[in-house]
Image: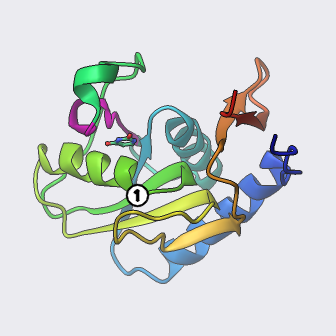
Amino acid sequence: MTSPTPLPDAEQLYGALLAGVKALAAATPQPIHLAGIASGGAWLAERLHRDLGWPGAHGVISSAMHRDDFARRGLAHSEQTVLPFEIAGAHVLLIDDVLYTGRTIRAALNELFDYGRPASVQLAVLIDRGGRELPVEATFSAARQALPEGQSIELGRDADGRLHFVLENKEA
Ligand SMILES: O=c1cc[nH]c(=O)[nH]1
């Protein structure tokens, strides 16, 4: 049995993510549009957009339709893709909670490109847990923490909006 891994505080990591996104925006001459990958990334993008005070609205991307296991899994999240800005020519910053194999990001990119061809796409995440299967890297990650293959980690959100991580051992 794998012993539970102590996890960083999600609220603390959110603070680092906010600072990272601010720095990234300051280094980019053109406006950046946030698009959060449902569900954890969408919560983060919503809060980042509010805390940054950026005009317009943030986007939400559902990766469900382009997942490589769609036939088995179907539509797990109720979130739909909502991109309330022009994608063609936009500088998009994808937001997600955990970067792992890269397959979710591949699926999210496919979904994004269904709406047009952005000028650029970057990625910012709370945790990069390693274990990549695809050549995907984050422009900014608030923390790097390797986790055993048998553990899954997800972002949870309390009723008052506070963020926490949910860690599960997948082994029987
Ligand atoms: O396409 C995807 C994305 C995430 N996880 C999967 O198993 N497949």
Magenta includes 65? yes
Query: What residue is at 58 percent from the left and 66 percent from the top?
Result: 130
Q: Which residue is mark 1?
A: 102
Kind of element beneath mark 1: loop
Query: What residue is at 38 percent from the left and 47 percent from the top?
Result: 104
Residue at mark 1: C-beta within 8 A of ligand 1: no
Decide: is 16 above or below 66.
below
Query: What residue is at 29 percent from the left and 33 percent from the top?
Result: 69
Between 69 and 88, the residue placed more toward the observer is: 69
The answer to whether 123 appears left or right of 160 in the picture is left
Decide: is 50 above or below 129.
above
The answer to whether 50 appears left or right of 38 in the picture is right
Query: What residue is at 69 percent from the left and 64 percent from the top?
Result: 146
Q: Quadrant of residue 77?
A: top left
Color encoding of the figure: rainbow
The magenta segment is 59-68
The answer to whether 103 appears left or right of 167 in the picture is left
Q: Position of residue 153 (x, y in %)?
A: 67, 42
Decide: is 30 above or below 55.
below
Q: Position of residue 20 (x, y in %)?
A: 63, 70
